[in-house]
Image: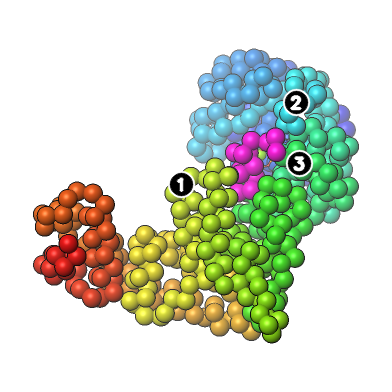
Amino acid sequence: MNASPTPAIRLPGFAMTLIDALEAEGHEAWCVGGYVRDALLGRPCNDVDIATDALWPEVKRICAARGMRVYETGAKHGTVTVVVPSAADAHHEAEHAVEVTTFRCDGSYQDARHPQQVQFVSTIEEDLARRDFTMNALAYHPQRGLVDPFGGIDDLQAGIIRVVGEAEKRFSEDALRTLRACRFCSQLGFRIDEDTYRAMLAHKSLLAKVSTERITHELDALLLGAHVRDALMATVDVLSFVLPELAAMKGCAQMTKYHVYDVLEHTAYAVENMPPTRLGRWAALCHDMGKPAAAFFDEGGVEHFYGHAKVSEALAGALMDRLLMSGAFKHQVMKLVRHHDDEIRLDNRAIRRMLMRLDGDPVLFRTLCDLKRADALAQAPAFGRGRVGKVEKLRRMLDALLEAEEVPSMRALAVSGHDIMGLGVEQGPAVGRILAALLSAVVDEQVKNAREPLLELARTMI
Ligand code: ATP
Ligand code: MG
């Protein structure tokens, strides 16, 4: 074993507990993968993976004998999940789940994703050779130090994502690795090695075989990354296989005085300008998706995108379905995209009206403010600055309004469905329509939110 001098990596107590337990019984155990990478980068990470030469039933026996719970989460591939209880944890933190995997190399792959069978091997170096990128093919042991057979430390220092071994082979084995590379690019701000990227492009079509859940999981992480703008720009030709909407955005120039970027670059900036929430980032990604379809040039050669928000909303909805997002999440993304470009007058009536359109949800409204700001900051500075100022005023007015009065919502309405039926309206959609019209009248200050005036107005609607 070729371990280099120990750099300052601190393993959490629960990881030490496990390594000590395995080694006390004559086995070898290492901390591997993401934890080592992130520790060397000084990034926070709690997700610990352990590699060991012990076969999984032996891992199970050793851990169970010490009072740890063991789950056979991937026993077929040599992986068990061990829950280290807080009592065994030097830091007395909560329980920690740790994946412990037997040293292995992967046999031939089926369906561009899963190894047909795995082979257990006896050395950590052989195990590291099956891992995806050099920066992830590092092992660390508190006494024996680092094992770095593929130049992972150099690549970490240079900020390069480079595949372990032959790029073509590694991406054809497992197509998810292409998306992992894009995601790491966004999380770490690294660039992808040229040969590695060429192979990613050549094998992107294999992503068709990867499960939607895994794709969505990687895209979520990519969008939440601190370097998402650069990642989107650098990897768009790979990403477009799962997000074909991006292909039309690339090179879709915006020949207006408001813009200095094409739709893709504008979008990439807007995503990064957005606070890192899943909802906000997806809404920003989708907000201008309809622009390529809505674009036209007038006789003066000026480009317009009338109605693009509606097309973007439709594309966002279809995309959310395709990626198997929940109905509630899809609904919120669509609302934000639909209204991202709406002019909201700076008066309480207009703000109440928008709040109503946003399901009376103040959080959604604040996210809309974030989106408007992120969008404005991604425009030509001369125009963006003024718009940012307006959004901040809007946000302050919204806060003041929410402080001063109850959010107008169906629930806060002074009459209920029962009251409407009491007026002789039959149970059914008509009741909902009347309630919505009453709410709208309250929001517009045409009627007070009080029982008698509302019932009087309702009578005129029957
Ligand atoms: P993070 O936990 O931040 O997502 P990670 O690198 O730890 O990043 P995991 O999915 O936790 O990713 O995997 C742990 C390790 O297993 C990786 O660091 C890598 O060594 C290896 N690995 C994970 N997925 C693959 C894959 N698809 N192909 C090859 N090796 C992989
Ligand atoms: Mg991990």
- The residue under label 1 is 327
Horizontal relation, residue 223 to residue 148: left or right: left
Instruction: State whether residue 38 is above or below residue 49.
Output: below
Q: Name the outermost residue toward the front.
A: 299
Instruction: State whether residue 438 is above or below residue 392.
Output: above
Residue type, numbered disc 3 = Ser
Q: Quadrant of the N terminus?
A: top right
| Foreground: disc 3 or disc 2 | 3
The one nearer the camera, 424 or 332, is 424
Which residue does the image show at 61% across and 15% down from the upper left? 61
Quadrant for ligand 1 reads top right
Horizontal relation, residue 52 to residue 413: left or right: right
The one nearer the camera, 176 or 154, is 176
SS for tag 1? helix
Q: Residues within 10 Å of mark 1 (few under 14, many from 20)?
A: few
Say if mark 3 contacts mark 2, CB within 8 Å.
Answer: no
Which residue does the image show at 72% across and 47% down from the upper left? 241
Residue type, numbered disc 1 = Gly
Q: Which label sits on residue 232?
A: none
Say if mark 1 contacts mark 2, CB within 8 Å.
Answer: no
Which residue does the image show at 50% across and 37% down from the upper left? 94
Horizontal relation, residue 239 to residue 305: left or right: right
Q: Main secondary structure of the magenta part?
A: helix
Q: Provide the residue span drawn in magenta.
A: 208-220
Position of residue 144 measured from the top left corner of the image (x, y, whole percent): 79, 33
SS for tag 2? strand
Q: Which label sits on residue 205?
A: 3
Position of residue 365 measured from the top left corner of the image (x, y, whole percent): 43, 65
Task: Specify which label sits upstream in the sequence, 1 or 2.
Answer: 2
Occupied quadrant, residue 150: top right
SS for tag 3? helix
